[in-house]
Amino acid sequence: MAEQTKLVKDMLEMFGPDRVFSSDLDRYTYTYDSSFLSQINEYYPDVVVCPKGTEEVSKVMRYAYENEIPVTPRGAGTGQTGGSVAICGGIILDLSTWNEVVEIDTVNMQVVVRPGVVHNHLNNTLSSYGLFFPPDPGSSKMATIGGMVSNNASGLRAVKFGNTSQYVLGLEVVLPNGEVMKTGGLKSKALKSVSGLDLTRLYNGSEGTLGVITEIRIKVLPKPQARGILLALFPKLEDSAETVLEVFKNGLIPSGIEILDDGGIKAANKYKPELNLPEVEAALFFEVNGSKPAVEYEGLQIKEIAEKRACHVEWATDPDRMAKLWQGRAVIGAASARVKEGATRIFAGEDVCFPIAKVPYALRAIKDIGKQYNTQVVIYGHIGDGNMHTAPIIDPLKPEEVEACHKVADSIHRLALEVGGSTTGEHGVGITRTPYMEEEHGKALDIMRM
């Protein structure tokens, strides 16, 4: 307690009461993110600091280094793995208010931002320049760019455009001892470089363990001219996955391919009754973008392939109709809990990633795991790259349902490893995937720890 009192006093002297939070209530609001583990435990920081400049971050890190105090960088706190909670106490650095777009360089197709910039805000800003930042985590209105870089986020458009790391050109990072470095070249405006070790890539997906990211230089692209949405409904879950495989075999790369299982369809209909989706085993949403002729051609090709197995297929390029078709996928995060009265959606066993060829098998296996533990599991996500979101729906006030949920999550993680996949495709390790790291990485885990 004496150590905490001194820490709080020192932080107040450095930054003042407007940017230092130490009351029980203030600290409690930082004890959790969206992960189930952080919500059933209480990981209190000793103090929360909201820095507003690189030098301020450096001062905190230098102090913490000299006094052996843990530091946890935090963005919007919307992560689903406990990666931004202070499991060892110490200092939380809240970077969410540090949200300046520092530079928009349209000629060199890049922007410089601070870590607290929200994804949707950045793309709204870029839109007037005819540009966009392609990775779309799905939680676009909440996710910060710093969080996306730290977890190497991907999301809805990863099939065509890849994940965040493919766009990060350089970073400013405060190291654990308070020193500041830039990766990607001190003055570089280049869109590519193989000069030196690729430290930029090292910090992508490092989850705040190697330093604090304080500035990000990212590549942006021209906005596509046209867009189309195709909805396909399947009586059999496996047929949806087989359709995705056939689309790829025909050389077609949509910008996104999303899936809802029967639970997801039911949830979407309860949340938005006007959707009135037929309650089949699976729905696929294909997004195609590019030039107008290319969009029309690819859309009709995908439609022809989908019609071989689907009971209903609709292709649309009209903006209003596209918005209505896409609603089914857009609402599922919030809607999934509706499949069970008095229950809620739990973030556990979330975002596993399977090899494309194993997706048909994995989808059915997840359904069987839910049945084995008498737990409703809604499946949705980015089937185009094998990244599935599995959402257990439980009453967290019932101990038997909580216990079953843990078993479901463990089984889903182990399924991913069994079929040659990964325990996390985009949300990161945090505290929820730690038990699986040795099995997934072997000797490489020792190198990561070093």
Image (spheres, rainbow, N blue to C red):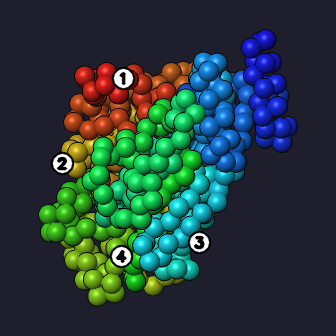
Residue corresponding to mark 2: 357
Q: Quadrant of residue 223?
A: bottom left
Amino acid carrying mark 2 in the image = Ala
| Amino acid under disc 4 | Asn
Q: Quadrant of the C terminus?
A: top left
Cβ atoms under marks 1 and 2 closer than 8 Å: no
> Percent position (x, y) of residue 197?
30, 43
Q: Distance between the residues labelled 2 and 4?
A: 25 Å
Left/right of residue 17 with respect to residue 240 in the rendered view: right
- Marks 1 and 2, the one that precedes in the sequence: 2
User: N-terminal of the two: label 1 or label 4?
Assistant: 4
Disc on the earlier residue, 4 or 3 = 3
Asked if residue 337 can be seen in this view, the reply is no
Q: Do the residues labelled 4 and 3 touch (CB within 8 Å)?
A: no
Q: What element carries label 2?
A: helix
Q: Quote the CA–CA distance across marks 2 and 3.
A: 39 Å
Q: Give the answer, above or below, for where 332 lies relative to 404.
A: below
Residue at which label 1 appears = 450
Of residues 82 and 375, which is closer to you in this image? 82
Residue bearing the label numbered 4 = 289
Assign the N terminus to one quadrant of the image.
Answer: top right
Say which residue label 3 marks. Answer: 125
